[in-house]
Amino acid sequence: MRWATVLLPALAAAALGAAPRADAGDRYYYLGYGVVQVIDGATDTIVADIPVKGAVRNVDLSADRKYLYVTSNRHLVHKVDLAQNRVVATADVKGDGWDRVMYGFVLAPDGKTAYGAFMSRRAENGEAIVGRPVVAQFALDTGRIVRSVEVPWGVAHLVGAREGRTIYAFGQDLYTIDTTGPDLRIVATQPILDKGMNMLPFWDYTFDNGGVASMNYYTATAMGVMLVDQKTGAIEDLVLKGDPAMAYSVVLAPDRKRAWAVMDDLTEIDLARKTYVRSVPVAEGTCYGVNVSSDGRKVYVAGGGSTLTVYDAKTLRPLKVLQMASDGMDLRRISF
């Protein structure tokens, strides 16, 4: 399936091209409730607990790879120093009389601002006034809104592309937002729900995948994987053959030819052939997050419960189970 305003060949080269170096030092960041826990990929042990306020949801990595920006409680943005494993600054997007809730988050290239998908409300004369949903650019130090554009209801996730010149906003449709002018503008709308696609655009693993966002969706008969190349903005839509596996999230293997998906089962996917390879039930039950080591030898499953399980990617046998401090929503990897 092709999307009208994007090019597939460039993405195919990026998504299915050369693998990252296998000797990178991996760190995994478990997004829990009130804490981000750091796991050393060499020993698969917890090496740091980073306290944050509330439930952690969205994250993005700074261009210099020194800071991880973590959102929590849908309105706080924490700047985490990766060398020190601690929060060094926190901004609150609530302000100017509005109670804002953020459902998507992506850093801007300037390193000083970010974009969020917001719903908002405020009290006026004893009544609740509900604001229109917007995608807005805001200052990372103060949380102050710089500019915004109204979007339809239901936008739940953002992916940045083309060096920040484009923001993809995922909701009932896919909205392409141009950021290059003085105002944010929706320049294209591509159907999602009307095409029978039920999408889960909450886990994208963009920096884990080396700049390619990966998200799964369902039709009445199949599961698909949508890939977004941050560099080019190209989108590829891979409809998998066979009875659909059930998955919350999907991450690319380092060879970019395979992927791993998770929900009740851990499933390996052949992206080139668009087929399922094998699967194994997840011992913990339903899980939200999945990741893979930079050498492709280990697969990590977490979220939905308070454990993290490390699997051998060749045999799919559990290698280790870690007891985490809380339930979690996701697991992200940074290779140093």
Image (cartoon, grey):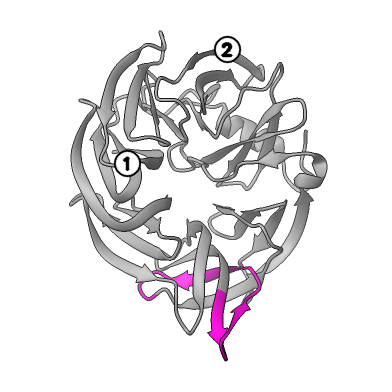
Q: Which residue is mark 1?
A: 29
Number of marks drawn: 2
For residue 126, which quarter of the picture?
Answer: bottom right
Which of disc 2 and disc 1 is earlier in sequence?
A: 1
Q: Main secondary structure of the magenta part?
A: strand
Can residue 63 be seen here? The reply is no
Residue 67 percent location from the top left of the image = 31, 54
Q: Is residue 73 magenta?
A: no
Mark 2 surroundings: few (<14), some (14-19) or many (≥20) residues within 10 A: some
Are discs 1 and 2 less than 8 Å apart at CB?
no
The secondary structure type at the circle numbered 2 is strand
Circle 1: residue type:
Tyr
Residue 249 percent location from the top left of the image = 53, 34
Q: In the image, which residues are magenta?
A: 121-142
Vertical placement of 197 versus 68: above or below? above
Vertical placement of 260 versus 115: above or below? above
Disc number for residue 277:
2
Vertical placement of 95 versus 329: above or below? below
For residue 305, which quarter of the picture?
Answer: top left
